[in-house]
């Protein structure tokens, strides 16, 4: 089994010293459109040949809209940063709404050349699996994203445990659709290692602010168990948060923990040597 690619999400002040340590990148549409410094960083990364996934910001907009941004915003942002992969619009916990939104997105993106990722949604395990089956059969979809919001709700557990259960089921399905882990909880390093241990070869990539936000909020990460002491209490501030020297060192160590769990060597020596 090959390694799992890791994208490190960090605040704008730490794009160069944290986000650049991932094996791939993940940019957020709402920040690409609002922040020229953020957009310029990911465009430079794309020009260097780093694969850049563009998220539709569904997680960040959860409380405001309950869905990801649509094709007008996402495709405008994708062009601005030369994204490799774009995430189709999804509607949180809504199977039918997500299928309609994904089909509309596919039509809008026709001929663009981007790889398309779909994100199944549902209010129950049966709904989620039915949505997954329909989305993965669309010929334009190259990868499926496993949400840190809907998968725990539908598979009855914390993010890491629920996605492991979900991935086990998906590996018994016909087909070879690749899987991307969207975000993570306090157990993300453990989760990545477990996917590899269990032979979940379809799990190819992950993005998360884990390595940035847990040190930023002072939450200890146990390197032996691959788990933080508890889940981060808030969503990350990705615009203004600056880490002090101690927190930055902890964040770099957390990047190393993630890349080791994913069986990828970091882009640089995260210990700073």
Image (cartoon, rainbow, N blue to C red):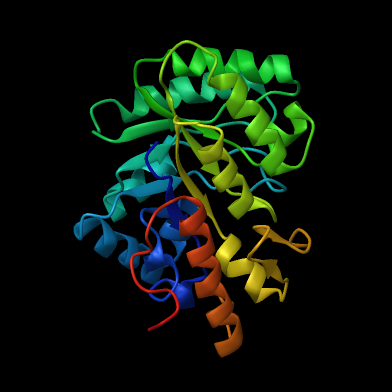
How many marks are shown on the rendered structure?
0
Residue in front for this viewpoint, 159 or 243: 159
Quarter of the C terminus within the rendering: bottom left
Residue in front for this viewpoint, 61 or 182: 182
Q: Position of residue 189 (x, y in %)?
A: 59, 54
Relative to 240, 222 lies left or right: right
Q: Residue at x 53, y 13 (%)?
A: 173
Q: Position of residue 210 (x, y in %)?
A: 60, 61
Q: Position of residue 231 (x, y in %)?
A: 76, 58
Residue in front for this viewpoint, 266 or 238: 266
Relative to 13, 68 lies left or right: right
Q: Residue at x 77, y 64 (%)?
A: 229
Specify whether residue 69 is in view. Answer: no
Q: Residue at x 64, y 73 (%)?
A: 215
Residue in front for this viewpoint, 251 or 45: 251
Specify whether residue 180 is in view. Answer: yes
Q: Residue at x 52, y 70 (%)?
A: 11
> Vertical placement of 235 versus 200: above or below?
below
Query: Residue 103 sits in which quadrant?
Result: top left
Query: Residue 98 sits in which quadrant?
Result: top right
> Vertical placement of 96 versus 192: above or below?
above
Toward the bottom, the furthest residue is 245
Q: Position of residue 9 (x, y in %)?
A: 50, 61
Relative to 115, 202 lies left or right: right
Quarter of the N terminus within the rendering: top left
> Vertical placement of 99 versus 20: above or below?
above
């Amino acid at each position: 089994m090959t390694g799992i690619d890791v994208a490190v999400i960090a605040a704008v002040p730490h794009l160069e010293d944290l986000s650049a340590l991932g094996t791939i990148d993940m940019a957020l549409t709402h920040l690409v459109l609002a922040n020229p410094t953020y957009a310029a960083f990911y465009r430079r990364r794309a020009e260097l040949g780093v694969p850049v996934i563009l998220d539709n910001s569904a997680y960040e907009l959860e409380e405001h809209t309950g869905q990801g941004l649509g094709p007008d915003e996402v495709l405008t942002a994708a062009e601005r940063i030369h994204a490799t992969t774009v995430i189709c619009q999804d509607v949180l916990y809504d199977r039918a709404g997500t299928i309609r939104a994904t089909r509309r997105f596919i039509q809008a993106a026709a001929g663009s050349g981007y790889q398309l990722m779909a994100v199944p949604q549902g209010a129950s395990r049966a709904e989620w699996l039915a949505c997954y089956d329909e989305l993965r059969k669309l010929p334009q979809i190259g990868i499926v994203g496993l949400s840190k919001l809907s998968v725990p709700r539908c598979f009855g557990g914390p993010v890491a445990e629920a996605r492991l259960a979900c991935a086990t089921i998906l590996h018994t399905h016909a087909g070879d659709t690749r899987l991307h882990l969207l975000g993570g909880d306090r157990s993300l390093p453990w989760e990545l290692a477990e996917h590899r241990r269990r032979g979940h070869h379809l799990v190819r990539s992950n993005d998360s602010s884990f390595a940035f936000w847990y040190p930023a909020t002072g939450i200890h990460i146990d390197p032996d168990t691959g788990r933080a002491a508890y889940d981060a209490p808030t969503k990350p501030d990705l615009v203004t948060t600056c880490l002090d020297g101690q927190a930055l060192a902890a964040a770099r160590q957390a990047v190393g923990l993630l890349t080791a769990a994913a069986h990828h060597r970091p882009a640089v020596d995260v210990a700073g040597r």
